[in-house]
Amino acid sequence: MWGQVISKHKKLDIPVPWPATTVSNEPERSKPFSEFGFKDWPWEAVCGPKLPQSRPDGTAWPCVSVITLTHQANAAERTRLSVRHQAYPNLDPITVTLEAGEQPRSALRRASVAARGAFVVLLADGEMLAPGGLAAACLIQSTDGATAVAGMRIGFGPSGVSTVDVIDACAPEWLNPQALPGPDLLMAHTVFERHVLGDAAAGDAPLRLSVMGRPMALQPEPETAGLPGMALSVAALTDGGAGGGASIADRRLTDALRLAGHQVRVVPLTRGASVVTAEWVDEFPAAEAAIAAGGFDLVLAGNIHGATRRADVLARMHAHAPVAAITHDLFLLTGRCDMPFDCALIHDRCTSACPTPTHYPYLAPNRIEAAWEGKRAFLRSDPPPLLLANSHWAAAFIRTVVGSALGAIVRRIDLAFPTQVFRPHDRAEARAALGLPKDDVLIMFAAANADDPRKGFLDMLPSLHAVARPGVGFVVIGRIDHPERLDLPNLFAPGPIANEGRLALWFAACDLHVTTSRYETLGMTPIEAGLCGTPTVAYRQTGLSTAVIDGVSGSLVDPNPAACAQEIARLVDDAGARHALGAWGRIALEARHSHAASYLSLLAALRAHGLVPPAAPRGRVRFDPAVVRTFAGAADPAPCASGIVRARPRRLVQLARRAKHAVLGRKLPLWVRRAAWMLKTARGR
C-alpha cells in the first residue's frame, strides 16, 4: 500500500516518496530538516524505543489518515518528511490538491471518502508533525478513551521557535466550526466528518478531548505571539531544606510556572532548615515580611516541616495572598507526623497519645494537640486554602480526613519531570559508561535514603532474594549504611547520586525498577524510571497506583513479597514484555508529566479555585518557547540539575549514624533533641 494523491476528479493510486506503513523506529537521516529552510531546527532525532506491535489494551495501532491540503501538485517536502519521521506502523498519507476556486472543505470531503484511517490528522503546506506525535496521540486516545487528542503546537518563524501553545480544553469551542482544525489535533474519523465537514450522516460523534503535554505539530507563520496575558506573581514557599523528593518536585513545578510565563520568587522560611531547630520555631520574620510586601497573587507552599512543626505561618501568609499547599506528604492533616497511614488518631484528634513522637518530624507529646488545632484552624480559613494532591490516592485520602467540616479545597495535579534528562539511552552504552555487566538482567531500587524502613526495602528483600540467580544483578541507588547486610549477589550500590543526568543514566542502564514502599503520596522514582524506558514493579497501594500506570509503564501487584517476586520473575524472563512496558511508559509518562503537562494540571486546579480566568485568551494556553528545550531530542536541551540529594556523607558521619542507630534506632528522644537545641542556641549566641 502506498500513499494516495487525490485530484479533483479521481483517486490516483501512484507511488509517492514515503510508504504508508513504516516499521522502523530509526529517523530518516538522508535529508535533514535543516535543508528545508529552517534555522535552529529544535530536534536532533526521534527519541524512544521501538514501538511495540500493539497498544497496552492489546489493540493494534489504529490506522491514521494524514491528509495534507495543498495548493500545488506536490505538498511541501518538509511536510512529507515529517510524516515519514513518525515511525508509526499504520499510516494512510493522503495529499489533496485544491483546484482553482475550490473551497477547502470540498477538497477534504474527497479526501475523507478515500481515507481508510480510524483517525484523521489535517496538515497544510509547510506544517509538520513533531517526532513521535502520532504514536503519543494514539496511545493517549487508547488509555483515555478520547475521540480527539490535542498536543502542543510549535510556531516557527525565520529565526526558529517563536511560539508554543496548546488547545485549552476549557475553551467553549476548542473545535471551531468556522475554521479548519490545526495539525496539533488527532480526531476520530467520525468526529472529523461530523464536526469539521458538517456531515450529519456521521451520527452524534461525541467530542471527548484529551490534551497531552508534549509536542504534536509544527506550524510556520504562527497565528499568535507572545506569552500569556494572565501572568501571575507567585511566591514559591519552601522550608529551606536541601535535597529530597519534595524539594526536587517543588523546583520542577516552579520551572513549569516560569515556562508558562508566570513570575516566580522562591521564598525560604529559613536558610538551611535544621531538624534541630524546627521543633521550637514558628515565626519567620524575613519570609513573612517578603510575602506581606510582595503583592503576590499566590503562595505556592511545599513542605514546611523542615523549618517548623506548625501551620500558623501559612495561616498568617494566607491573609496576604491565597495559599496553595502541595501535599508531598500528609503533614498538614496531623499533629506532627507526615505519613500517618495506620494511625487511627488522624480521623479523630491528634493528642499526646501519639504513638510516634520520637520519629521525624519530631515533636514533644505535650505540644502535639496544639499543633493539630493550629492546622485545623488553617484548613478552616475563609477564604479556604487550596490543597494540591499529587496522586489520585492522596486526593481521596485527604478528602476523607478534611471532610465537609473543613473548608480547604482539594485538587489533584501532576508533578513535573525534566523529560529531556530522564529519557531512554542506548542500554549497552549506558552500562559501559557505568561499568555494569553487559548481558545481565539488572533490577534496580532507588531512594534518597534507601535504607529508610518506610521506603519498603526490607519488605522488598525477600522478593529480590527469590529471583537471585546467575545472570541477574541488583542496583541500589541512595544512602544505605550497611549494604553488606542485604546479602544480595551481583550487587552494585553507588550510593546517593546528586546529578539528574547521571541518575537517568543508571535508570536507563537497568532492565527493571522495583519499589515496595507503603508510605508514598506519589513516588517519583517509578516515573523517572519509566521516562527512561525502564518499567516498574510496585505494590498496588497509596500513591504508587498513580506513579505506575498498570499495564502501561509497569505492573502493580498485591502488597506482599510473594506476589512481588512472582511478577519480577515473570518480567526477568520476558524481555519482550519489559520492552513493551518501557516503550509505552515513556510515551504515556512524557505526555502526563512533562513541565507543560504539569502546568496544565496546575492551571485546571487554580481555575477551579477561582484564581485564574475560566478559559485562556483565544482558546489556547501559551508557553515560553524555551519549553521546547525540556523535551527529549531537543537540539539545545535544558541543562540537568545537580545537588538534587545530599552527597555521600563523610566516613565519620557514617560511623556516627551507625552508632546512633545501634543505640537509639531511628528514633530521636526528646532529651537528645533538647540538648542539640541548647547547643545550637549557645553556638548562635
Image (spheres, helix red, strand yellow):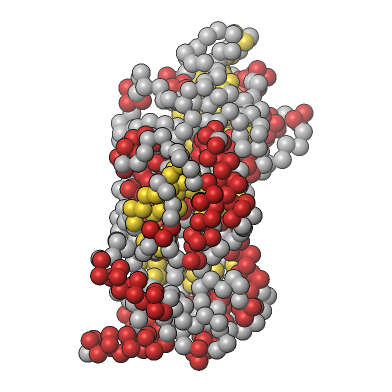
Residue 327 x, y percent position in the rendering: 51, 67
Residue 162 x, y percent position in the rendering: 37, 40
Residue 259 x, y percent position in the rendering: 39, 52
Depth order, front residue of 655/10: 655
Q: Could one spot residue 427 in this view of the protein?
A: yes
Residue at point 40%, 22% (across, down): 28
Q: Quadrant of residue 495?
A: bottom left
Depth order, front residue of 682/31: 682
Residue at point 66%, 74% (across, down): 403
If the image is split into quadrants, where does the C terminus sit?
bottom left
Depth order, front residue of 119/471: 471
Q: Could one spot residue 308 in this view of the protein?
A: no
If the image is split into quadrants, where does the N terminus sit?
top right
Residue at point 50%, 12% (across, down): 16
> Which residue occupies the extreme bottom position in the image?
366
Say whether residue 189 is left or right of residue 93. right
